Amino acid sequence: MFFGWIWIKHNACVGAFERRRYMNIVVQKAVHPQLADYIHSVITGLLPFIQKGLVERVVVIFHDKDHVPLEKFVFKLAVNQSYGSELEESSLEFALRAFLIKLTVAGPLTKPLPSDSSWEITAYFRSLPADGAKDKEEDEARLWIPTDTKAWMQPPQITPIKSMRCDPLKMQLYLEQPGPSAEAEDPAS
């Protein structure tokens, strides 16, 4: 879902994405084999942690050539662990469709990126599995490495894009960009 932003921001990557329908909404799906594998491994790697409520945010970060963040698309997640199996799929699907529609029209909120920019996906955990957790959980947690993303010196400018609340999932999407004072200090902008 959030990889549509990569297509929006790097639409010069001809052949890496193609238009597909998902939940009766037009989305961009990765078709480049390495990109599709990367996205699949990130999603499958994060899913158990998201389901357990350990992931607070998943962030798609766009960097300049010096690895300084230019924009961050933040997906803040909360999963109601007590909800159990009483999931109303139709309600959740309706909420997710509304979220996807908003993603497709939010492109104008962003700024153009330099041609030498790059991106990464970063997950912010509330906590990692405790010592004594199942061996598989500990092994999965060790696969995640700390990011070397540089921080902005000033608080970011935050632009809300969409939020949804449909038990058992609450999700909020917002855009973080360098604050006005940080942009004024940067001689490259």
Image (cartoon, helix red, strand yellow):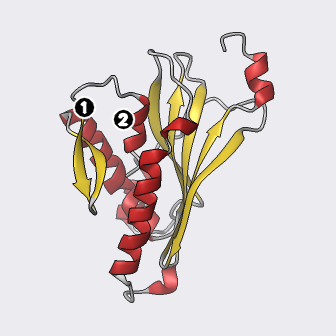
Q: Is residue 87 left or right of residue 34?
A: right
Give the residue at x 44% y 15%: 115
* 101 lies above or below 121: below
The answer to whether mark 1 and mark 2 are in CB contact below 8 A is yes
**SS for dot 2:** helix
Instruction: Determine which residue is flagged by label 2.
Output: 7
Amino acid at the residue labelled 1: Ala
Mark 2 residue crowding within 10 angstroms, few (<14) / some (14–19) / many (20+): some
**SS for dot 1:** loop
Count of marks, rendered view = 2
Along the polypeptide, which appears first: circle 1 or circle 2?
A: 2
Distance of label 1 from label 2 (alpha carbons): 8 Å
Any part of residue 109 in sight: yes
Of residue 25 and residue 150, the one placed in the foreground of this image is 25
Mark 1 residue crowding within 10 angstroms, few (<14) / some (14–19) / many (20+): some
Percent position of residue 110, x then y? 55, 34
Classify residue 85 by image quadrant. Answer: bottom left
Of residue 71 and residue 51, the one placed in the foreground of this image is 71
Percent position of residue 7, x then y? 36, 35
Of residue 13 and residue 103, the one placed in the foreground of this image is 103
Q: Is residue 16 left or right of residue 77?
A: left
Give the residue at x 50% y 44%: 106
Give the residue at x 40% y 69%: 134
Amino acid at the residue labelled 2: Trp
Percent position of residue 88, x then y? 37, 84
* 30 lies above or below 54: above
User: What's the mark number on residue 16?
Assistant: 1
